[in-house]
Amino acid sequence: MFSERRRETIVSRARARRIKLLAGMTALGLCLTVTALTPEPVAAAVYREEEAAVDSGLIEAVAMTVDGVHAVTVDSEETARTILNEIRAGYLTPRTESAAFRERVELLPCLTAPEYVMAPADARALMDPENTASPVALTVLTMATVTREEAVPFATETVLIPDGYEDETSVTRAGVDGAARNTYRVIYENGREELATLTDSETVAAPVNEIVTQGALTGSRYDSRGTYIWPTTGVLTSKFGGRKISIGSSNHKGIDIGNSAGTPVVAADGGLVIFAGKNGGYGNFVAIEHDDGAVTRYAHMRKLLVEEGQRVAQGQQIGEMGRTGTATGNHLHFEILPDGETRVDPVGLLTGELQRR
């Protein structure tokens, strides 16, 4: 049984909380009615009148609430503070400058039945930040000053080459990362880094920028230009159209340019190699399809320097002059098919003059 003075003190406390108790919303009411976690309606028989005597079966305890929600009930404020300190201490390191709970934690004196008072270990387990299944698990926020040596990425400088194309790039100087000693104000949530704010930086080694050259011209060197240059040097030995041969006559479908064996043969325009290999009487033969659908053809070469599927630029060497296939001497047989099917006289489409060498 309580002493009369003790009873008056408790009744005084009870009166101050009477209205909230009847609403079932305060920690006191929760203490009086708490099960393990879930509040129940306040028993109407607890405080019916201001003069009602306090049930001698209730004991003084402390309710711990988290953001206004009842979490646990323990035997004393000392036990509650010990639980909070132990939880907080689990996330302290030698570098920790401050620590706090993200949630609002309140310790509220209350009256409750003895069976509702939790053992300290059980209460701590329920509020443990690592207890992801608990609705009242706390979040510990700590702050520390941390210094780290970190890489400083190098930048890339681009130098434009006037006569190059935009897809032609080359690294002329490799970049090297630098290093800096950075100081951060770091906030941790349950020991895991949540936010780092840079407060100071000291250069340890300056980065070396990468230098890249890139062409200034739009497009690719391998695009078709829409014009044709002479595919080799030498002498025009046979024109397009009808010509006399040793027996009868022939309708020549291209032009022949004669020169010594090994004379370079180049692509008359940029495009895609659609054939490269032996082709009957044409001998070693290359066909190039250009971006507008036109095709140029090169025959009788002694050596091929390109492969099918390869893109070539206008003026790029594709082979060497020879006499493979049906040929009486070293020369290049050259054809232009503007629509990809019909061969026409190349001379009228070639720019400039045929050079002898």
Image: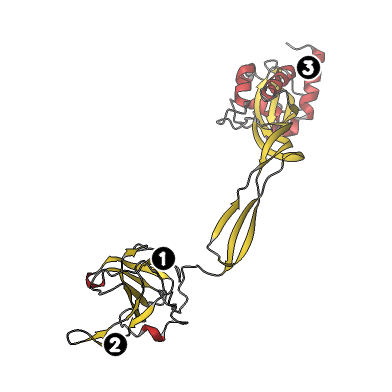
Q: Looking at the image, is mark 3 or mark 1 nearer the viewer? A: 1
Q: Is residue 134 above or below residue 208?
A: above
Secondary structure under the numbered disc 1 in the rendered image? strand
Q: Is residue 262 left or right of residue 140?
A: left
The dot on residue 241 is 2
Instruction: Judge the density around disc 2: few (<14), some (14-19), many (≥20) Cα neighbours within 10 Å.
Output: few
Name above or below for residue 154 compared with residue 111: below
Q: Does residue 139 lie above or below 257 as drawn?
A: above
Q: Residue 143, located in which quarter of the rendered image?
A: top right
User: Distance between the Cα atoms at labels 2 and 1?
Assistant: 30 Å
Dot 3 corresponds to which residue?
A: 7
Q: 204 or 253, which is in the foreground?
A: 253
Kind of residue indicated by mark 1: Arg
The crowding category of the residue bearing disc 1, from other C-alpha atoms within 10 Å (few below 14, some 14 to 19, many at least 20), is some
Exactly how many numbered labels are in the figure? 3
User: Image point 41% across, 65% down: which residue?
Assistant: 311
Q: Secondary structure at mark 2?
A: strand
In front: 336, or 284?
284
Choose mark 3 or mark 2, whichever is in front. Answer: 2
Q: Which disc, if any, is residue 221?
A: none
Give residue 311's mark: 1
Q: Sequence-wise, which precedes: disc 2 or disc 1?
A: 2
